[in-house]
Image (cartoon, helix red, strand yellow):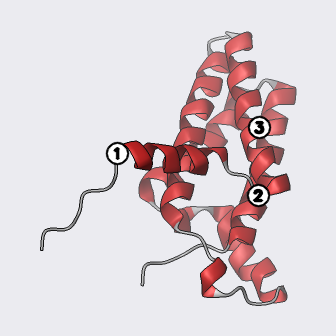
């Protein structure tokens, strides 16, 4: 069975992402956004296990919570896709701030923050929903039999 994700861990990670993105929004610092961009890239393109906030959740938070049934765990594919979407917005925000295109940086940063906040506060993942819509139009290839 493929690895699955604890949705509480996904929300925990989104909450920390909100803090980082909020700091970026308040300071307008391309350096802060660059750090978040790297985190998004690691999760989206290398693997979810590299997320340091996920590691904090697994080691410090999850052991204190009741076990979650396998049926309530999430497929990591939509979450990885969502991290890729976050990466795109973070790259645009980082570039906007670095090039002193403040409006571009602020708008991209704010949109990423809204998406992370929706996930952290309500468990609603915009990137995951986009993934499902795209899968409907471009389904995965069927295995040859």
Residue located 75% across and 52% down the image: 119
Q: Earlier in the sequence, mark 3 or mark 1?
A: 3
Residue marked by disc 2: 123
Distance from the alpha carbon under mark 3 to that under mark 2: 14 Å
Q: Kindly indicate the quadrant of the structure image that contains residue 49.
A: bottom right
Residue 101 visible to an observer of this rendering: yes
Residue wearing tag 1: 138
Q: Residue furthest left?
A: 145
Q: Position of residue 111 (x, y in %)?
A: 72, 30
Q: Residue at x 65, y 25 (%)?
A: 93
Q: Residue at (75%, 20%) from the top-left corner?
A: 106
Mark 2 or 1: in front is 1
Task: Check disc 2 and report its element: helix, strand or loop.
Answer: loop
Q: Position of residue 110 (x, y in %)?
A: 77, 28
Of callouts 3 and 2, the N-terminal one: 3
> Observer-nearest residue: 95 or 71?
71
Which residue does the image show at 73% across and 20% down from the upper left? 107
Indicate the secondary structure of the residue bearing disc 3.
helix
Circles 3 and 1 in contact, beta carbons < 8 Å? no
Residue at image mark 3: 113
* Residue placed most toward the observer, 120 or 45: 120
- Reading the chain from its start, which is encountered first: label 2 or label 1? 2
Local crowd at mark 3 within 10 Å, few (<14), some, or many (≥20)? many
| Marks 2 and 1, how far apart at CA | 25 Å
Q: Which mark is residue 60?
A: none
């Amino acid at each position: 069975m493929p690895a699955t994700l604890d949705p509480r861990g996904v929300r925990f990670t989104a909450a920390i992402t909100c803090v980082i993105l909020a700091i970026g929004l308040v300071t307008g610092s391309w350096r802060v956004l660059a750090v978040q961009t790297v985190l998004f890239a690691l999760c989206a393109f290398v693997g979810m296990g590299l997320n340091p906030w996920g590691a904090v959740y697994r080691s410090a938070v999850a052991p204190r919570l009741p076990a979650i049934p396998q049926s309530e765990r999430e497929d990591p594919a939509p979450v990885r896709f969502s991290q890729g979407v976050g990466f795109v917005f973070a790259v645009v925000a980082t570039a906007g701030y670095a090039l002193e295109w403040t409006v571009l940086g602020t708008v991209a940063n704010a949109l990423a923050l809204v998406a992370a906040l929706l996930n952290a506060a309500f468990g609603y993942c915009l990137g995951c929903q986009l993934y499902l819509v795209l899968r409907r139009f471009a389904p995965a290839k069927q295995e040859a039999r």
